[in-house]
Amino acid sequence: MRILLALLFAMIAGPAMAQLSTSPGEVMRGAVNNFIRPAMTDFGAKADVLSSAVSQLCTTPSEANLSAVDAAFGDTGTAFGRIEAIRVGPIMDENRAERLLFWPDRKGIALKQVQAILSSKDESATNPATLKDKSVAVQGLTALEFVLYGTGFETLQTADGAFRCRYGSAIAQSVAGVADELVTAWNAEDGIALHLMKPDATFTDFRTPIEAQEELVGILSHGIEAVRDTRLNPFLAKGDVGAKPKLALFWRSGLTVPMIRANVDGLQSLFALSGISGGVPNDKADLPASITAEFSKADAALDLVTDPVDAAVADPAQAQALADVVTATQQLGVLIGEQLSSALGLSVGFSSLDGD
């Protein structure tokens, strides 16, 4: 994937950049067909594997089956991380975004509610149909992470963890079900994909190609903002206040940095594969190269973070690398949210993070 992205970035940032001219319609077709649909399909496939793996663990508890679940959880989490910024269309209906990942969770609601279910052995939480009626905090990837990696997880290798496993299986089935709904919705001929690629005055969401392209730039801009404000800043040291790694997403599973990388890689891919750079006017022809350079800086910094988050923040070099990712996201926020939107004559609205 990285080699492909490097080739794409070289193409969009080359000397011919000033001569390119891509229409908003072409950009949206590129975004939907080259990135969003394939990435949604990948997430759906990975979630199905996770659901099957947890089911197998419940049927035959063992260290080997728990290891298979561990791998599938990482694959599913990062597959979702690549599309997490696509907060438009079906993921915003029926609380799907929160049912997949209840985060940020500043008050620790998910932990308390998941622990309560495990303590009381509430059987209604072991059926996806009745689990759906409960709090969104107990039916997504954050809840499943505690089941798989939180206090008492080792019982999953034995019969003693039967209830815990059934609950985890219900969560995994729920995640897979939501993922499959997203795949179906994005591949529908008359759904959100059509509205983005072929806006119409009769639509209530995207009436013009410009409105659709504004949504795309908003996804990129707000996605970068979310990486900085919900993934990195909550746990990094600030001034005299030390780092708080247990405020990081997925610190128990060791997926904090892989999820950040997945978020960044997904945004990189969407930027490159949409072809949005082709619509930049000649007098701003250096802007795509500047955006590409900042994405590369974020990638290079993340390459230096090799330890789990608790160890990484205690190591000066890795802590600095994480700080460098923050700096790169700040620059990308300006380059995309301000300069790219201005160059394309767009108006990017407020982020869903505003007001939190």
Image: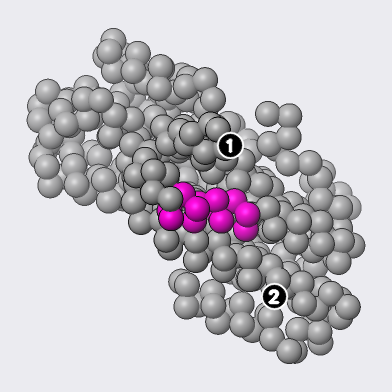
Determine whether 38 is above or below 114 in the image: below
Q: Is residue 120 above or below residue 26?
A: above
Query: Is 64 on the left-hand or right-hand side of 176?
Result: left
Q: Would you place residue 312 above or below residue 167 in this image? A: below
Q: Position of residue 125 (x, y in %)?
A: 35, 20
Residue farthest toward the top in the current orientation of the protein: 120
Residue 289's disc number:
2
Q: Residue pushed farthest front?
A: 240
Q: Residue at x 87, y 61 (%)?
A: 342
Picture coordinates of residue 280, whole percent (x, y)? 82, 73
* SS label for mark 2: helix
Q: Which range is magenta?
A: 317-328
Proximity of marks 2 and 1: CB atoms separated by less than 8 Å: no
Instruction: Determine if the magenta segment contains residue 319.
Output: yes
**Colouring mode (rainbow / by chain / secondary structure / one colour):** one colour
Is residue 44 visible in the rendered image? The answer is no
Badge 1 amino acid? Gly
Question: Alpha carbon of mark 2 to alpha carbon of mark 1: how far?
Answer: 33 Å
Q: Which residue shows up at 55% across the image and 51% down it?
A: 323
Instruction: Tell me if I can see residue 159 in this picture.
Output: yes
Is label 1 in a helix, a strand or a loop? loop
Residue at numbered disc 1: 239
Q: Nearest the camera: 40 or 64?
A: 64
Q: Which quadrant would the C terminus be assigned to in this image? A: top right
